[in-house]
Amino acid sequence: MIVSHLSLKNWKNFRTVDVPLRSRVFLAGPNASGKSNFLDVFRFLRDIVKRGGGLQQAVAERGGLSQIRCLAARNEPAVEIEAGLAEASGQPPLWRYAVGIQQSRGEASSRLVYERIWNHDGQILDRPDDSDAKDPMRLTQTHLEQISANETFRELARFFDSVSYLHLVPQLVRNPRAFAGPGIPGDPFGQSFLERVASTPPKTRRSRLSKIEKALVSAVPQLKELTDTKDEAGAPHLEAIYEHWRPRGAKQREDQFSDGTLRLIALLWSLLESQSLLLLEEPELSLNAAIIRILPAIIHRLQGKHKRQVLISTHSAELLSDQGIGGEEIFILTPTEEGTKVEVASTIQEVRDLLEIGFTPAEAVIPRTTPQLGAQRWLFDA
Amino acid sequence: MPETYINLVFEDMLSETVLRRLLRCSRVTYGVGFAHNAGGSGWIKKRINDFNRAAQGMPYLVLTDLDTCECAPVLIRQWLDTPKHPNLLFRVAVREVEAWLLGCREAFAAFLGISESRIPTNVDGIADPKAFVVDLARRSRKRDVRVDIVPEEGSMAQVGPAYNERLRLFMEMSWDPAVAKRRSPSLRRAIRALDLFEPALPSSRNRSNC
C-alpha cells in the first residue's frame, strides 16, 4: 500500500497542502522550506499508532501542539491531516484517515476535533460520537491507537506503524556508546543500526549484505566480503576486506568505513528492510556525484515488485538529473509569507514545457528552489 | 505588480547580480520567474536552442560572455539553429561581464583603490576583463582588496578567493548602469533591449481574437 493522497492544514510550515503522491516522491526546496516537516507528518502518524505511543505522546514529542501549528495560522485553528491509502499510484483509495487536533492555550492536553475513517465501502468512523459527548476525555486519544477500538481498521494502523525514516549520522553508527542517553525513539539517525542488522534472521541478513556488497562494488571497489560479526563483548559490527597493495587486503570494521560507505550501506539496507513507506532524508549526503546520479534508479529497483513507497528530501541537482524521474514525482516547496506552498512539478506549466523540450528534471526544477543570495556584506565588515 | 515576468539564465552569480540590477533599473517593471545559474557558458550553449523554444511560452533573458568569439552577432548566429524568438532576450557581454562593471570607471577605481586613469574609456575593448580586474587589484592601495581579488602567488586559480563576492558587493553598493553604459556599447544595447521589451503572447492566446 502507498499513501496516494495527502491533505494538510496548519501543519508546521504548511497552511494548506493537497497533493497526490506516487510510489516515489522527491521533495525539493530551499533550506528551511519544510522538507523534513513534510516527512514528519508520516512519522507523526506512526508515533500515534506505535507501541508506547499515542496522540498525546506524538504531540508532546514535538513540543506541544503550539509547536506543530503553522506559524502563518491565526486564531489557533486545528491542525488537520488527511491521508488516502491505495494499493498503488493512480489506483482508487482503499482507506482514508482524517484527523483534526486542537489545543488551546492553558489546556494540558491536545484533543481531537474529529477523527474520521473511510474504507472502500464508505465511512466507518465518525468522531466525536455519542460516547465522546458523554465523556470528553475520550477525545484525548484516537481510535487508531487503541487496539480495543481499531479492529475494523487495524490494517490502517499497521501501515502507519511500519513507516520508517532514515537520516543516518555516520558518527552515531561508529560510536553508538559515545552518545549516552535513552536513544531517540525510532532510531532515525542509525544509533542502533548495527543492532538492527544483527537482530535480523541470519539467512535474510546474509542475503541483504550480499546484495549490498554487490551494489558497493561500483561505488567502493576496494571493499569486498561485507559481513557482520561480533566483538568479544558481544557488540555487533560490520566487517569487510579492504583491498590494498598487500596480497590479502586488511579487515576493516565500520568504524574505519568512510562516511559515504556507511551511509550507502544503511541506505541500501533500509531499502531492502521492509515493504512499507520509507522516508529518506537527503540520501545524497557524503556520496560522490556519479553515485548520486544513479540513486533514483537504485531506489526504483529496490522498491520491489509491490512498489514500496519512498519519499526523498533532496538538495541535489545530480539526484534530480535522472530523466527517468517524472514531473509528477517531484514536489516543489516554496516558502511564502502564508506558509510553504507545495506544488507537484508537473502541474506547473513552465516546468512541463521545459521537460517536454528535453530538459532534465533538475534543470527544470532546481532553479525554482535556489535562494537568491545578495552580496555577503558581513564578510567584508572590518 | 510587475508588468512582465521573465526567466533568467546566466553563467554565474556575478552575472546574476548584474541582470537583477539591470531589471530593477529598467523602464519596464520586471518580475523574475526563475533564475538558472548555468555554471559557465558551456551549458548555456548546449541549451540555448531549447530556451529559444521555451520562449514561446514565457520570456527568457540569457546573458553570456563573448569571451574569445569574434563578435556578439557571430556568437548568436553560431549558437542558434533557428531564428531567435522575440521572447528570447539573448545578451552578450563584451568580452566578459566584468567589463560592464569597469564601465563605472570612477566608482570602480575608488572601490579597488587605484587611479581612474588605469581603466580605459572603452571597456568593451579590453581583451580579458577578468584578468584585467585582477591586474588592477594587484596595484591596489588596499591590502584587503589585494588578498580577496588576486590569487596567491603560485596558485593555479585565475582569481582570488573572494573575487566574486567582492565584485558583487561593489555592484550592490556603487555600480550605476546608467554611468557604465557610456563606456560599454554592449551594456548600452542590453539596457535598451530591456527598456523596449514587450513580450509576444503565445500563439494560442493570440487566436482568441478571432
Image: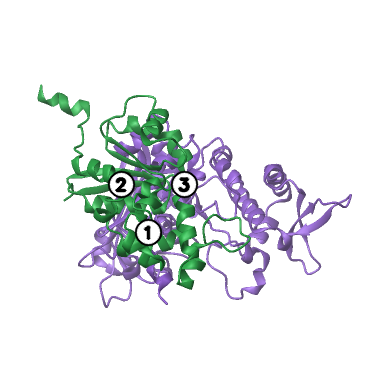
Chain colours: A purple, B green
For the residues labelled 3 and 1, the Cα–Cα distance comes to: 15 Å
Q: Residue A79 placed where, x, y %?
A: 29, 61
For the residues labelled 2 and 1, the Cα–Cα distance comes to: 23 Å
Q: Which mark is residue B187?
A: 2
Residue type marked 3: Gly
Q: Is residue B114 visible?
A: yes
Q: Is residue B125 above or below residue B178?
A: above
Among the two numbered marks 2 and 3 on one chain, the one whose residue lies closer to the N terminus: 3
Q: Which mark is residue B39?
A: 3
Alpha-carbon neighbours of circle 2 within 10 Å: few (<14), some, or many (≥20)? many
Residue type marked 2: Leu
Using the rendered image, report if marks 3 and 1 lie on a common chain: no
B204 left or right of A156 in image:
left
The answer to whether marks 2 and 1 mark residues whose Cβ atoms lie closer than 8 Å is no
For the residues labelled 2 and 3, the Cα–Cα distance comes to: 21 Å
Using the rendered image, report if marks 2 and 3 lie on a common chain: yes
Quadrant assignment, res B113: bottom left
Q: Which residue is mark 1?
A: A373
Q: Residue A245 placed where, x, y %?
A: 85, 51
The answer to whether marks 2 and 3 mark residues whose Cβ atoms lie closer than 8 Å is no
Mark 2 or 3, which is nearer the eye? Answer: 2
Alpha-carbon neighbours of circle 1 within 10 Å: few (<14), some, or many (≥20)? few
Q: Which residue is painted at 46% across and 34% down in the image?
A: B46
Mark 3 or 1, which is nearer the eye? Answer: 3
Q: Is residue A332 visible?
A: no
